[in-house]
Amino acid sequence: MTLTTAVKRLAWTGLAAAFLLAPAGLAMAQTADAGDARAIEFGKDIFKTKARCQFCHKWDGTGDQGYGGNALSLRKTQLTREQLAETVKCGRLATEMPYHDKFAYTDKRCFGVTREQAGGDTPPDANQFLQPSEIAAVVSYVFAKIVGKGDPNYDECVDFWGKDTQQCEPLKK
Ligand code: HEC
């Protein structure tokens, strides 16, 4: 066998391997997508029902000036995923943004302070505490559907509330 045929063979083997592996790679990507979609759906449920983020931030995350003080716009937030997850876990000191990690402020996991040290600045506890997986899911949801999305539209509204409601009529064009 000459060197060139050896190199050619090697190249073909590599190519064949790439083709054989491609479907496996694709299947993995599809599973990841389906997994993401499930996480986002789960996160929506937490946003809407379990943690009721929408009470203060509104369904579309544009925020509100009513109950719970001035809940910031999640559409316009500049926070990274980590920072946003921390905000959900720990709430925000000296504001009405509640903490959702049951053990926040029992030790120094949140901003390095205990409840004793934070004193009156300790944020309120959430109406429902969340498991780490639930926090991850709600963060996925917020990033998939809210952060950086501009003005809310009719389709997003129906996506959130479903079709059997008048809620979205004002957004209909
Ligand atoms: C009781 C009302 C209330 C609830 C419920 C609530 N928030 Fe908030 N949230 C606030 C307020 C008020 C602020 C503004 C805090 C401040 O002034 O910095 C805030 C701030 C935030 C911020 C910081 C945004 C930024 O750009 O700095 C994020 C992120 C956030 N909330 C996400 C959530 C999520 C996700 C949930 C549900 C798991 C939730 N909030 C539930 C009231 C609430």
Image (spheres, helix red, strand yellow):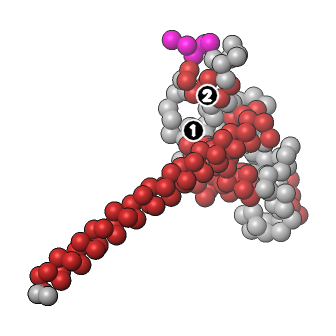
In the shown orientation, is residue 129 left or right of residue 36? Answer: right
Picture residue at 62% right of the left edge, 56% below the top: 83
Residue 151 forms part of the magenta stretch = no
Q: Say what secondary structure mark 1 lies in.
A: helix
User: Image height check: is 77 above or below 64?
Assistant: below
Q: Which mark is residue 145?
A: 1
Q: Position of residue 43 (x, y in %)?
A: 68, 44
Q: Position of residue 112 (x, y in %)?
A: 74, 68
Write the start and end of the magenta stretch as one range: 169-173
The residue positioned farthest toward the front in the image shown: 1
The quadrant holding residue 10 is bottom left
Picture residue at 46% right of the left edge, 61% below the top: 24
Crowding at mark 1 (Cα within 10 Å: few <14, some 14-19, many 20+): some
In the shown orientation, is residue 83 left or right of residue 124? Answer: left
Tell me, yes or no, whether the two marked residues, 1 and 2, touch with CB atoms within 8 Å.
Answer: yes
Q: Which mark is residue 106?
A: none
Question: Is residue 123 visible to the viewer in this orientation of the structure?
Answer: no
Residue in the foreground of this view, choosing between 17 and 115: 17
Q: Say what secondary structure mark 2 lies in.
A: helix
The quadrant holding residue 76 is top right
Q: Earlier in the sequence, mark 1 or mark 2?
A: 1
Q: Which residue is mark 2?
A: 159
Residue 172 forms part of the magenta stretch = yes
Residue in the foreground of this view, choosing between 149 and 32: 32
